[in-house]
Image: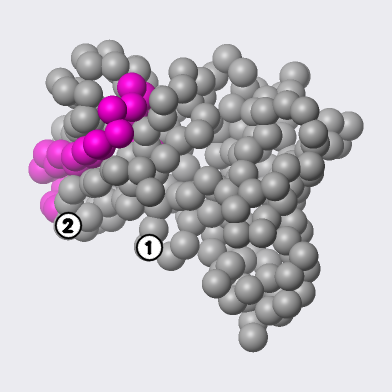
Amino acid sequence: DAGITQSPRHKVTETGTPVTLRCHQTENHRYMYWYRQDPGHGLRLIHYSYGVKDTDKGEVSDGYSVSRSKTEDFLLTLESATSSQTSVYFCAISESKLGYEQYFGPGTRLTVT
Amino acid sequence: AQSVTQPDIHITVSEGASLELRCNYSYGATPYLFWYVQSPGQGLQLLLKYFSGDTLVQGIKGFEAEFKRSQSSFNLRKPSVHWSDAAEYFCAVAPRTDKLIFGTGTRLQVFP
């Protein structure tokens, strides 16, 4: 298995609070991604990174920001959490430019009350 | 716009029976095609992929998939299902100038 960890694995937070999720990899892969998984929607891309300090938006980026100051870490921040952001969040990594052959972390279950 | 359709939300089969999960895509050219599996509480694991060449591809855990250009399909098959195959299965496509697009998933239930 690819060396990808996510922290925390579970989190409950209140509406309006900021939340940061961390993805850490030991594979030295260049590309990193954040997805959210919701019933009936599959996985939807939030943000991705193609290198240190190089990030871009995915299809559902509103309300989220990311940072990547080191190759191994990719942080996802919910600036002010809302109930609609209750979801399971997955980090993925990839060596390749077009984003295929992605390897996924175990996920973080976030509940916003 | 590119899209991926998995028409079956939930499938139930008996252990030992054959399985086929459907996947159709909408894209002008042939994209890269993937099947991922997600066991309960886990992340996604790549089962197999198609880039080019032989349209029948073999994957892990005894799965195979066949690419049919004329039908824009990439269906996943297994000749004999095991109880441990119970999971959610995602088809994904990567249009050759863009990122992965996932289908909404098919949940497989296996009865003994």
| Along the line of sight, the residue nearer the viewer: B41 or B57 | B57
**Residue pointed to by mark 1:** B41
What are the residue bounds of the magenta stretch?
A: A13-36
Residue A20 lies in magenta, yes or no? yes
Q: Position of residue A108 (x, y in %)?
A: 27, 51
Q: Quadrant of residue B42?
A: bottom left
| Along the line of sight, the residue nearer the viewer: B29 or B4 | B29
Q: Is residue A61 visible?
A: no
Q: Classify 10 Å Cα crowding around label 1: few (below 14), some (14-19), many (20 and above).
A: few
Q: Position of residue A102 (x, y in %)?
A: 45, 35
* Residue type marked 1: Gly
Q: Residue drawn at (18%, 55%), measured in percent from left and top?
A: A11
In the depicted structure, whether residue B26 falls above or below residue A43: above
Q: Position of residue A34 (x, y in %)?
A: 34, 35
**Residue pointed to by mark 2:** A12
User: SS for tag 2?
Assistant: strand
Q: Residue drawn at (19%, 31%), measured in percent from left and top?
A: A73
The chain letter for the residue carrying disc 1 is B
